[in-house]
Image: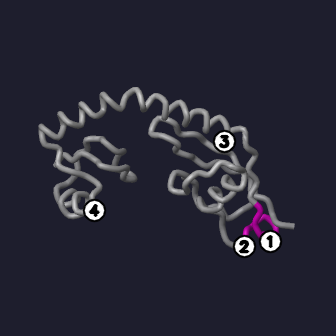
Amino acid sequence: MELILKQDVQNLGFKDDVVSVKPGYGRNFLIPQGFASLATPSAKKVLAENLKQKAHKEAKVVDDAKKLAEALKALDIKITSKAGGEKLFGSVTNIDIAAALEKAGQPIDRKFITSGVVKRTGKYSASIRLHRDVIIDLAYEIVAEQ
């Protein structure tokens, strides 16, 4: 079953992508939730026309995302957490990284940050998706609270 995505769906595709999914997933989840619509021949033609019109606007968005990526790479992110030796009491997740970026003046939504659950102090890396074409690796450090 071919569908046109109306918004980004994690692990499936981005807005305005034509994706092929199993019929049950499309009929029972994506279409009722408003995430997608059927990819009929006329809908594909409308989508192609809309994508042509968005092409030059998209270049500006990608340029802004690249500028933000450079600003993020220049940041030195340190997250303090309570720890016993090297082991943390709790863990550091995407929420903590998003909060540290917010404190540094670069607010990024936590759903665009991908890092595992970290339970020890040290240096780590998180992947941040600013745009479908702009994905950066952000280095951060977890230090023990004094």
Residue at the image position 40 percent from the left and 26 percent from the top: 56
Tell me the crowding category of disc 4: few under 14, some 14 to 19, or many 20 or more residues within 10 angstroms, Cα based.
few
The answer to whether the residue labelled 2 contacts the one labelled 4, judged by CB atoms less than 8 Å apart, is no
Residue labelled with disc 1: 84
Q: Amino acid at mark 1?
A: Gly
Q: Earlier in the sequence, mark 4 or mark 1?
A: 4
Residue 83 position in % (x across, y down):
78, 69
The stretch drawn in magenta includes residue 92: no
Q: Secondary structure at mark 2?
A: strand
In the picture, the disc for residue 72 is: 3
User: Dot 3 surroundings within 10 Å: few (below 14), some, or many (20 or more)?
Assistant: many
User: Hey, which quadrant is residue 25 in on the image?
Assistant: bottom left
Q: Quadrant of the C terminus?
A: bottom right
Amino acid type of the residue tagged 3 in the rendering: Leu
127 horizontally vs 79: left or right? left
Q: How is the image coloured?
A: one colour
The numbered mark, 3 or 4, whose residue comes first in the sequence reads 4
Q: Position of residue 59 (x, y in %)?
A: 46, 28
CA gap, disc 1 to disc 3? 30 Å
Q: Secondary structure at mark 3?
A: helix
Mark in front: 2 vs 4: 4
Numbered tag placed on residue 33 in the rendering: 4
Tell me which residue sits at (39%, 53%) in the image: 10
Mark 2 or mark 3: which is in front?
3
> How far apart are the two marked residues, 3 and 4, measured between alpha carbons?
34 Å
Apparent side of residue 84 relative to residue 124 in the rendered image (left or right): right
Magenta segment, which residues? 80-88
Mark 1 falls on what kind of element?
strand
Q: Is residue 82 magenta?
A: yes
Of marks 1 and 2, which one's residue comes earlier in the chain?
Answer: 1
